[in-house]
Image (tube, helix red, strand yellow):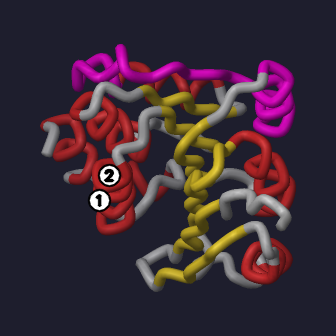
């Protein structure tokens, strides 16, 4: 593991105060990115870059790229500092702004991604899912955080994605909880 990640993990109070993933969830994110071999990854909710470091580490190993969005310029500056210190900043594009606005811009530019990781405003997860339908290519993967720790706040999202014919889903019982979803590939009508 990267020394910057290890240093951040040695201060769990710092990570918790900045809404970062638990260590086990961050390792799962890294492994998912590596196993999936994703080339274009999108993160909604950078915070101080702990999860971004995991995605960037995977990206550096497979010549991929991470785009990450956060509304806080201060937290993104901290994330960029961590990425630079780790030597991973070249694998990441940090976008500052309201997530829904930035995602609409990405849609307007017809950008597509292989993996979308969501760890942002819980009240907006349903909108993020709807945008993911355009931003992810066929077979693209959506990973949504906090589906266990904030289950009541996210009930509408969890119900919608699990009921949608456009997604194959699984609820994962990690410390925060994840919904892991794969966008179904379009079927040609016979």
Quadrant of residue 107 within the rendered picture: top right
**At which x and y percent is residue 91?**
37, 21
* Magenta-colored stretch includes residue 91: yes
Residue at coordinates 59% horizontally, 64% vertically from top-left? 182
Can residue 12 be seen at all in this image of the molecule?
no
Give the residue pinned by disc 2: 30
Residue 8 screen position, x and y as percent: 27, 45
Q: Quadrant of residue 127?
A: bottom right
Specify start and end residues of the magenta stretch as a single range.
82-109
Which is nearer the eye, 37 or 87? Answer: 37
Spatial CA span between label 1 and label 2? 5 Å
Q: Is residue 153 above or below residue 123?
A: below
Let me know if residue 116 is in the magenta part. Answer: no
Residue 117 relative to residue 48: left or right: right
Q: Residue 42 appears at what percent x and percent y?
A: 57, 38
> Residue visible at 83% across and 76% down?
160
Q: Residue at x 35, y 14 (%)?
A: 90
Q: Is residue 165 visible?
A: yes
- Identify the residue under disc 1: 27
**Left or right relative to 161: residue 82:** left
- What secondary structure is found at the residue carrying circle 1? helix
Q: Is residue 56 above or below residue 108?
A: below
Secondary structure type for disc 2:
helix
Q: Is residue 183 left or right of residue 115?
A: right
Residues tagged 1 and 2 counted as in contact (Cβ below 8 A): yes
Packing grade of label 1 (10 A; few <14, some 14-19, many >=20) is some
């Amino acid at each position: 593991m990267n020394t910057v990640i290890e240093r951040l993990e040695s201060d769990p109070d710092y990570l918790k105060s900045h809404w970062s993933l638990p260590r086990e969830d961050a390792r799962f994110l890294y492994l998912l990115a590596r196993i999936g071999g994703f080339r274009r990854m999108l993160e909604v909710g950078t915070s101080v870059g702990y999860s971004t470091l995991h995605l960037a580490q995977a990206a550096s190993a497979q010549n991929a790229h991470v785009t990450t969005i956060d509304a806080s310029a201060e937290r993104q500056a901290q994330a960029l500092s961590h990425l630079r210190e780790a030597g991973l900043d070249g694998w990441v594009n940090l976008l500052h702004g309201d997530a829904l606005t930035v995602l609409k811009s990405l849609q307007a530019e017809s950008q597509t991604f292989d993996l979308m990781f969501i760890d942002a405003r819980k009240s907006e997860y349903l909108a993020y899912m709807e945008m993911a339908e355009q931003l992810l290519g066929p077979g693209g993967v959506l990973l949504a955080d906090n589906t266990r720790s904030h289950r009541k706040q996210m009930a509408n999202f969890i119900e919608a994605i699990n009921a949608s014919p456009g997604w194959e889903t699984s609820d994962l019982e990690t410390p925060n909880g994840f919904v892991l979803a794969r966008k179904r590939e379009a079927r040609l009508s016979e």
